[in-house]
Image (tube, rainbow, N blue to C red):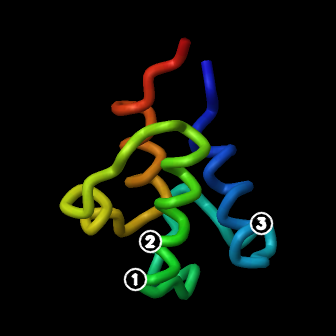
């Protein structure tokens, strides 16, 4: 089984140049990780490419914490 949370944390660390210990499951995207709406859109684009899915804007606007994105991936990504 794919650990989407760990993969997501690594992606965030790499994309935004953050320290690994600053990205936690309960980290808030805006306040804890200082992500703007544009940063989130960039992250979503990378996630969509990596997992070959499409995340509608109405869904990703609901993402407030790292856990929200990880849970979405667990629910919507189909593994082969």
Q: CA distance from mark 2 to mark 3?
A: 16 Å
Residue at point 37%, 45% (across, down): 54
CB atoms of marks 2 and 3 within 8 Å = no
Who comes first in sequence, dot 2 or dot 3?
3
Q: Is residue 52 left or right of residue 24?
A: left
Residue 11 in the image: above or below residue 37: above
Q: Which image quarter: residue 34?
A: bottom right
Q: Which residue is mark 1?
A: 37
Quarter holding the N terminus?
top right
Q: Which residue is mark 3?
A: 14
The picture places residue 53, in percent across and down from the top left corner, at 42, 39
The picture places residue 37, in percent across and down from the top left corner, at 40, 83
Q: Neighbour class for label 1 at 10 Å: few (<14), some, many (≥20)?
A: few
CB atoms of marks 3 and 1 within 8 Å = no
Q: Which residue is mark 2?
A: 41
Quarter holding the C terminus?
top right
Residue at point 36%, 32% (across, down): 76
Who comes first in sequence, dot 3 or dot 1?
3
CB atoms of marks 2 and 1 within 8 Å = yes
């Amino acid at each position: 089984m794919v650990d989407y949370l760990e993969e997501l944390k690594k992606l965030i660390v790499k994309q935004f140049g953050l320290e690994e210990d600053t990205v936690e499951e309960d980290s808030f995207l805006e306040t804890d990780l200082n992500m703007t709406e544009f940063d989130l859109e960039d992250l979503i684009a990378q996630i969509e490419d990596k997992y070959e899915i499409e995340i509608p804007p109405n869904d990703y606007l609901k993402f407030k914490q790292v856990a929200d994105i990880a849970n979405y991936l667990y629910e919507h990504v189909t593994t082969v």
